[in-house]
Amino acid sequence: MGENIISFYREKVKKEWKIAFFSVVIVGFLVHTYKFTNYFPNHDGLFNFWSTQNMVASGRWFLAPACALSSCFDLPWIVGILSIVFMALTAVFLTEIFEMKNPCLIALSSGLLVSFPAITETMFFEFTADGYMLAMLLSTIAVYLTRMTKGVHWKNGIAAAGCICLACAVYQAYVSFAFILAVCYFLCELLENRYKTGAYWKWVACQAGIFTAGLALYFGIWQLIMKLSGITPASYEGISSIGAFSAGTLLTAAKQCIKSFIWFFLERNPALYGFSLYGILGIAFAAAFIAVCAAAFHFSGIRKHPSMVFLFLLCVVSLPFGCYLCYFISPGVEYFTRMLQAIVLLYILLGVLCERWTSAICKNLILLLLTAVIANNAVMANVCYAYLNRCHEQSLATATELSTRIHLEDDGTAENVAFLGSIGGNWTVTEEDTMDSSKLGTLGPLKMVNYSLLSDRDLIVLFLNRYLDFTLEYYRAHDEDPPVYQFSPTAPVPQGYTLRFPIADQETTETLSGSEAVQQMGLWPGRDSVRQIGKTIVVRFSES
């Protein structure tokens, strides 16, 4: 049993594939094991302890099947393993796409892929991480199937369009990954100058058709599913405005792309807040990328062919726009770091071009730079995970005390709870924290790691309900279910999600807020900050 598998592994699996796969496994577990072996959800995670990931309204109609292997539960270790495997397979395909042979380059590329800040932020929302990593793998396979070295067969083109369709249906941002990977691959092929000019133009036209077909197929299936299910598009992240184009929105999107692309590497204004290690490495990368691209352009000889020069410049100019492609697809979108995994391909491209077109000294310098980037990414990831853990501990402790205090006041006649004002905490993120070089200002694009999990009413209710099975004595004594809780319109509630909690209605809350009895109460966590007034337990967090 298994002899054929072992024989296949020894004889058919290339050495480069093994290096790529196991580099991702080793670096991935070194960087992310803290998260894989702990459960400390953020605000979205509170909704998704158990969830089918049915996100059709958000355009992610393939997310549920993509996450099916890890079950409907948020299981950090299982999801982590699956995510690592999908990323490792992605690294294997990247070695083939870029024809990597140098073990150091393969290991560096794999380390960059698995440690990039976009992956770390995705792990904040780990209940979908395996699905997102599958989307990245599908995006990579789409480009692999249409390499110039093999010729773009019509069957491969259809399969590539299908991969793009499914990747977009898991998470729309991974269309950018496929696009940037195609551009980076094409740049390498251009510089190699192995084909006639017409072949390059033909490949570009073919890719345009594949991406158009893939996105059209995605949109068509989404519209059909919504029509059959009676679902309307969500307003979240501008999903409902997909395809709403005009000259003004396209110009605005272009400006947003350039600005966001620059600030991703700088992270903050060094003139105002000084330099962080992330910013220094970002500036060093940008300088190295420009220098290596210029060297590759010079030594490749394509400058003698005007049409190829045009294609080269077109590829370079398209990079910032491709990384932030969703600005053009959905005008109302707001970019988060987890949507920017495509940028890691620029780091990998730097290594690939450096290996092919520069001297030994330059190669060693780039090796040190990319190693420093991976090390800094690993440190940032673990700072974030430690912060998530601290937020979770503080929130759970506060929720436990809050539940106890409410039960002490409950005389058995209280039918609802009113939370007045907002609750903060020592670990609530402020704008100053994100710029302070001694706090979250060192975390680059991960500086908005989280906020206190009890920072608004919805999250207090979730913590009390999901962690402490909170209810009032009135409902226990009468064997009744509390009323269905109405979440605020901006809460990231999954489709079909319901929760029961005895919250006071808006009219009761407003009446109590202006009453003399409430004004005489102290503020949380003061001894008189929790009081039963009539049939309502009032918790006063702040003045307003």
Image (cartoon, rainbow, N blue to C red):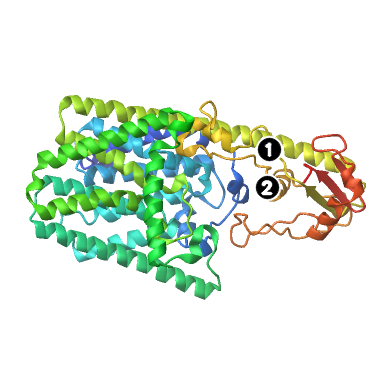
Name the secondary structure under disc 1. Answer: helix
In the rendered view, does 532 fall on the left or right side of 404?
Answer: right
The image shows residue 543 at horizontal and vertical percentages of 79, 43
The amino acid type of the residue labelled 1 equals: Ser
Q: Closer to the N terminus: mark 2 or mark 1?
A: 1
Residue assigned mark 1: 395
The tag on residue 36 is: none
Which residue sits at x=82%, y=56%? 510
Residue 187 visible in the snapshot: yes
Q: Give the quadrant of residue 103.
A: top left
Q: Total of numbered circles in the picture?
A: 2
Q: What is the crowding at mark 2: few (fewer than 14 residues within 10 Å), some, or many (at least 20)?
A: many
Vertically, is 323 above or below 39? below
Which residue sits at x=35%, y=39%? 113
In the rendered view, does 402 fall on the left or right side of 91?
Answer: right
Residue 37 visible in the snapshot: no
Residue assigned mark 2: 459
Task: Decide which of 12, 474 is in the foreground and name it.
Answer: 474
Are dots 2 and 1 in contact, CB under 8 Å? yes
Which residue sits at x=15%, y=49%? 190
The Cα atoms of the two marked residues, 2 and 1, are separated by 10 Å
Q: What is the crowding at mark 1: few (fewer than 14 residues within 10 Å), some, or many (at least 20)?
A: many
Task: Decide which of 242, 469 is in the foreground and name it.
Answer: 242
The image shows residue 313 at horizontal and vertical percentages of 20, 50
Name the secondary structure under disc 2. Answer: helix
Q: Give the quadrant of residue 327.
A: bottom left
The amino acid type of the residue labelled 2 equals: Leu
The image shows residue 37 at horizontal and vertical percentages of 53, 34
In the rendered view, does 474 fall on the left or right side of 443?
Answer: right
The quadrant of the image that shows the N terminus is top left
